[in-house]
Amino acid sequence: MKKIIQDYDYNGIRGLMQSLGEPEYRAKQLFLGLTQGKSVSGISVLPASLKAKLSEQFEDKPIEIIRTLTASDGTEKYLYRLADGNIIEGVLMKYKYGNTQCVSTQVGCRMGCKFCASTLGGRVRDLTSGEILAQVLTVNALHAKGKERGVTNIVLMGSGEPLDNYDNVINFLKNVTSPDGINISARNISLSTCGLVDKMYDLAEESIPVNLTVSLHSTTDGERARTMPIANRWSIAEILKACTHYFNRTGRRYIFEYALIEGENCDERHADELIALLKGKPCHVNLIRLNEVKERELAAASEKQAYRFLGLLEKGGLSATLRRRTGADVGGACGQLRVNYLNNGE
Ligand code: SAH
């Protein structure tokens, strides 16, 4: 594979242009074109000779949308093909306040959560920071209206474990929040982790105050280990300590994801245990009914159960919401589109 030009920040592009003997304004034109989601060949102000030189070194299109599915609620799901032929997926959810894009950070995942489709074939490879950024630039360009951004919020909740691809993800966060580029505020970005505690401490030191989201899904280490192998490495107590540290360093409230799985994690005892764990902490609980994955045995809690669980948490003094399952009619949970495509070509 050739190099990915979207891996470069503005200084990197300047250095590249200098090394090719190009004037400074070419760096500006190139960087602006890339920020607008164009491929190098599509930046019309650049001379053909420069494009030819760049195409020797760099992929023209690090990612390409090969399919878009639009749900009845307006949610769009994308299948992307990477330059090496690998397939990843992502989502754009439309809300009153703007558009939230869900991006992938790895091809596949090696965390092995029992409810998740992304991890079914293991981890194939990490994405480079430019491949993560190119998802945002491409989808932003599709939806931008004049000066108004097409993507206002980003969640790192697609395929992959962001903290298992730490350096590339940090580089992505630096570039996507840079005033030189698309400049999306860190406050509008959420990073979701299954709980790689050592990396959560590292993240707190990066001075990129993104919202930290942890996939909890259980109230005891023993039960958590039944669906999340990472629970054998880090305990819930260690996760909570790392969250408190993150809050102390960044001032950001943290969020727990909790997928309601029938017969597994959402009876009254679990509500009590969750309240005991989280009461008084500067956090929020996002409940979601499990998106059923056909390769997996687990079933979603009923809507009635979900509202009951939510009610119990609220009564116990937690801040919690039940997320609606956006785009459920076009392929459910993250990872399902890719798995269907790889298995059946559909
Ligand atoms: N690896 C990261 C981010 C990717 S998953 C993490 O674990 O947080 C994004 C969220 O979707 C996580 O909370 C994950 O646990 C959840 N998820 C995965 N499969 C799901 C499913 N089938 N139904 C509901 N949520 C699911």
Image (cartoon, rainbow, N blue to C red):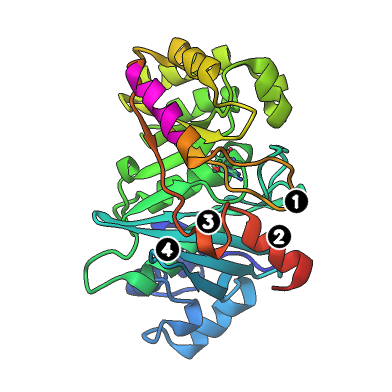
Q: Secondary structure at mark 2?
A: helix
Q: Amino acid at mark 3?
A: Ile
Q: Amino acid at mark 4?
A: Thr
Q: Amino acid at mark 2?
A: Val
Magenta span: 306-315
Which numbered dot is residue 132? 3
Dominant SS type (magenta): helix
Contact flag, marks 3 and 4 (Cβ < 8 Å): no
Q: Residues within 10 Å of mark 2 (few under 14, many from 20)?
A: many
Near-viewer residue (106 or 47): 106
**Residue 177's x, y, as percent?**
35, 49
**Residue 284's x, y, as percent?**
37, 28
Give the spatial CA distance, label 3 vs label 4.
20 Å
Q: Residue at label 1?
A: 295
Residue at image location 38% in from the left, 73% down from the top: 142
Give the vertical position of 129 relative to 245 (above or below): below
